[in-house]
Amino acid sequence: MPIDVSAALSAAPTVREASWTERDVLLYHLGLGAGVNALDPAELGWVYEKGLKVLPTFAMVAGQGVSAGTLKPAGMNMPGIDIDLRKILHAGQALTLHAPIPASGSATISSRVADVWDKGKAAVIVLEQSAADADGNPLWTTAMQIWARGEGDFGGDAGPDVAAAAPERAADKVLVSPTSTQQALVYRLSGDLNPLHADPTFAKMAGFDQPILHGLASYGVVCKAVVDGVLDGDPTRVQNFSVRFAGSLYPGETIETSVWRDGDTLTLLATCPERDGQPVLTHATMEIRS
């Protein structure tokens, strides 16, 4: 069986050492479309090592990029889980920041399967990761939801229902983020070499007209848009950022992010205007520091 739920949940955490340099951060930001206006001092702060800022979503790729040596194709190599890449999609992502991420550094990252939910036609695998610095101080915690088509109906728990509808009032701000046609090809150099994002033949086999942009790239693009457009360019104000991936985005399309603010909580909705406002990220919230 591709998923052995008992084996996946009972397995000991996998621990690895990760390190990164300014070069990894620069490449990650470029993969999100930063630096298009390289003469803008605010934009330059993301793509120039002098005074380099680090988006909190860099946590999703830390230790996986060019400084890690040979890049390896993405896979589901976890105890109790053996799934064809063509059957999986990134369903949701949550990130909690415990401290600012340095532009270069190292961390011990512990990974475990925290849950497996039965959605009938699919299974959702919840992969939790926690990172700590050399002194054991926590840096970040993430929870990734992976949608595995055809792996459900095993009699398990369906998981929690999360209702996070956008407010009925007009958004407080709307942020527009164009993407480039080569953006997925740049973003994948930060560690995710799933051919779904580069190989047209593979993408068609997976049911898409062409390669799609990584869900985590959209996640980072929206985070950057909010930091730039709402948080005065200060990435350290992001405390938590949680989303569900509602639809694919083709490189070259635009992400339009509506923002509603209620104190230190932002509710977000990201859509694609080229496709009549089709949702890209939903159930999206960001907790911020004042």
Image (cartoon, helix red, strand yellow):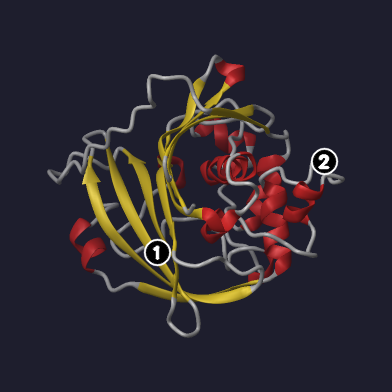
Tell me where residue 165 sits by quadrant.
top left
Near-viewer residue (67 or 52) = 52
Q: Residue furthest left?
A: 155
Residue for point 49% across, 67% down: 99
Residue 245 tag number: none
Q: Where is 153 relative to 105, above or below?
A: above
Amino acid type, callout 1:
Gln
Under circle 1, the secondary element is strand
Residue 148, above or below 260: below
Q: Which residue is pictured at 32% across the width and 57% down the height? A: 81
Determine crowd level at label 2: few under 14, some 14-19, many 20+ residues with C-alpha closer than 10 A. few
Q: Position of residue 116 (x, y in %)?
A: 24, 51
**Cα–Cα gap, marks 1 and 2:** 34 Å
Mark 1 highlights which residue?
A: 129
In this picture, is 92 found above or below 23? above
Q: Is residue 243 visible?
A: no
Q: Amino acid at mark 2?
A: Asn
Badge 1 or badge 2: first in the primary sequence: 2
Specify whether 251 is left or right of 241.
Answer: right
**Image coordinates for residue 23, horizontal then vertical, percent:** 73, 65
Q: Can residue 68 be spotted in the picture?
A: yes
Q: Residue furthest top?
A: 276
Q: Is residue 194 left or right of residue 144?
A: right
SS of the residue under disc 2: loop
